Image (tube, rainbow, N blue to C red):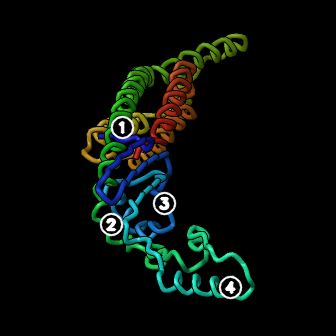
Amino acid sequence: MLLSMTGFGDARWQGPDLTISVELRSVNNRYLKINVKATEAYQALETEIERTLRETLKRGTVNVQLQVYRQPRPDDYQINLVALEAYQKQLQHYAKKNSLPSDLNLGSLLTIPGVVDDVYSRHPHDTAQDWALVSPVVQMALKQIQIMRADEGQKMAKELRSLVAALQLRLTEIQTRAPEVASDFRKRLHDKLQNILNDQSIVLDPGTLIKEVAIFADRTDIHEEIVRLGSHLEQFYTFLDEKESAGRKLDFLVQEMNREVNTIGSKGNDLVITRHVVEMKGAIEKIRELIQNVE
């Protein structure tokens, strides 16, 4: 089963204390690269997130966006009564000493540093404890992205099968044409030499003709290349049907297919075969482009 390296998945969970959202976006990459973006406090979970994703994903660049909002609690913020009373007494004493109004605005006192105690900031929550809640949300987003990648992979597999089928048809045409190449060469060479020798009243030596044809046939023999390319095409179908996405295997196989087609084109020495080779190279290039996005 083929999997695309392009996909998107997101998930959200809300509890009494935390609201968690995870967003995954992936694009093609020869290797697996994971980028995690989260609020500073939750950057500590990057290792756990990456470990989770690596258990499922094999290739691609995956961008992870983690957002966690923690609902404030009453105990997080307290008034420092000792500081408040100390400031109040000092201000009243100062006002009395300098004959100033002694009525104090309570709101003003609360703005003095140290009066309102931000317990949460001084003793931040241990975000590692939240992994038990974050992990299922990551798994849900991962499941969503896998569904999308699998759907895209099925579409690519269908297109790849069509392209490989076209290659097989071209290869069959070449296989049929190949034995005729030497025969056509023999006829052309015989006619050309016969025309030349007739003007000189010289009889064509059959042995010489046979020798030249044999040299040509050996030089243009593409039987091995045809057999190997046919084997590659059959193996291509096998890789498409494997349980795990075989992007790396297909990538290597396409290189071998391209090599055999190039050799057929260079050795074939025939206009009909050359036309088939041109079409086959175009199909292989399309296959190569598709496989660049297969995990």
* Callout 3–callout 1 Cβ contact below 8 Å: no
Question: Does residue 227 show up?
Answer: no
The residue pinned by badge 3 equals: 38
Alpha carbon separation for disc pair 3 and 4: 53 Å
Query: Is 194 situated left or right of 252 in this image?
Result: right
| Three-letter residue code for mark 3 | Ala
Q: Secondary structure at mark 4?
A: helix
In the image, residue 243 lies at what x, y percent?
A: 24, 45
Q: Residue furthest front?
A: 99
Q: Earlier in the sequence, mark 3 or mark 1?
A: 3
Mark 2: few, some, or many residues within 10 Å (few <14, many ≥20)? some
Q: Image quadrant of residue 126? A: bottom left
Residue occupying the point 56% across, 72% down: 110
The residue pinned by badge 1 equals: 148
In the image, residue 89 lies at what x, y percent?
A: 58, 86
Alpha carbon separation for disc pair 3 and 2: 14 Å
Above or below, 205 against 59 in this view is above
The residue pinned by badge 4 equals: 96
Q: Secondary structure at mark 2?
A: helix
Q: Image quadrant of residue 160? A: top left
* Callout 3–callout 4 Cβ contact below 8 Å: no
Q: Mark 1 or 4, which is nearer the eye?
A: 4
Q: Earlier in the sequence, mark 1 or mark 4?
A: 4
* Callout 1–callout 4 Cβ contact below 8 Å: no
* Callout 1–callout 2 Cβ contact below 8 Å: no
Q: Earlier in the sequence, mark 3 or mark 2?
A: 3
Q: Mark 3 or 4, which is nearer the eye?
A: 4
The residue pinned by badge 2 equals: 130
Q: Secondary structure at mark 1?
A: helix
Query: Is 287 situated left or right of 102 in this image?
Result: left
| Three-letter residue code for mark 2 | Asp
Q: Which mark is residue 274?
A: none
